[in-house]
Amino acid sequence: RITIENVRVSSYSGTGGTAAGIGIINSSFVLLNNVESSYNTGRGFNIGFCGNLRVINCSATENTSDGFNIGSDLGTPCQIYGCNAYNNNGDRFAISQVYATVTLCDSRENAGDGFDFTIAVGASNQSGVIVACSAVNNALYGFELGGVKEYGCIPVNNTSGGFNLTTV
């Protein structure tokens, strides 16, 4: 079990495609609560191959890549609740191959989509739900849904549009 709470990571200057202020790979029962990852070179959060993941009240601000990059679970649910991604240079919430429940999250002023759910080539489906989230002033779509179900989400002034419903 990994628990990280009440932590702020700032100005990390890693290199490579997976550089991140917070990076967790190949773990089970991960809880991130009230964690901020900001002004990093690379992603704010890079989380992969994690089972039973919970990300609660976390924020990613002004990172040079994605705010949150979460992918490839171990067949268990992922919960993202009350998080925000502001002014990141990549996408915001990039979620792939995960059964995810994303609730009450906010994505603003990012250089990509506000929320981007993608399916890897050859995968049959992206599953999960996104509930009561907002996407404001992002450079691409507010919500790139990739097959997940959306309930009560609000897009405002995203350059490419509010919702893109394509699955691949």
Image (cartoon, grey):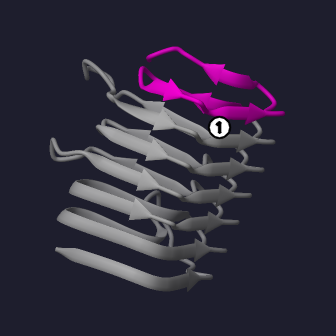
In the image, taking residue 16 as reference, residue 107 lies left or right, namely right
Q: In this view of the protein, which residue sits in the foreground, 54 or 90?
A: 54
* Residue 101 lies in quadrant: top left
Mark 1 crowdedness (10 Å alpha carbons): few <14, some 14-19, many ≥20: many
Q: Against 20, is 144 above or below? A: above
Residue sitting at x 19%, y 64%: 29
Residue 155 in the image, given as x and y percentages of width and height:
72, 32
Residue 59 in the image, given as x and y percentages of width and height:
58, 66
Q: Which residues are magenta?
A: 141-168
Q: Helix, strand, or loop for circle 1? A: loop
Q: Does 17 appear in magenta? A: no
Q: In this view of the protein, which residue sits in the foreground, 8 or 106?
A: 106
The quarter in which the N terminus is drawn is bottom left
Q: Against 93, is 18 above or below? A: below
The tally of labels here is: 1
User: Which residue is under mark 1?
Assistant: 113
Q: In this view of the protein, which residue sits in the foreground, 156 or 97?
A: 156
Residue sitting at x 47%, y 85%: 6
Residue 135 in the image, given as x and y percentages of width and height:
69, 41
The quarter in which the C terminus is drawn is top left
* Residue 134 lies in quadrant: top right
In the image, taking residue 138 as reference, residue 83 lies left or right, namely left
Q: Does 155 appear in magenta? A: yes
Q: In this view of the protein, which residue sits in the foreground, 43 or 31?
A: 31
Residue type indicated by callout 1: Asp
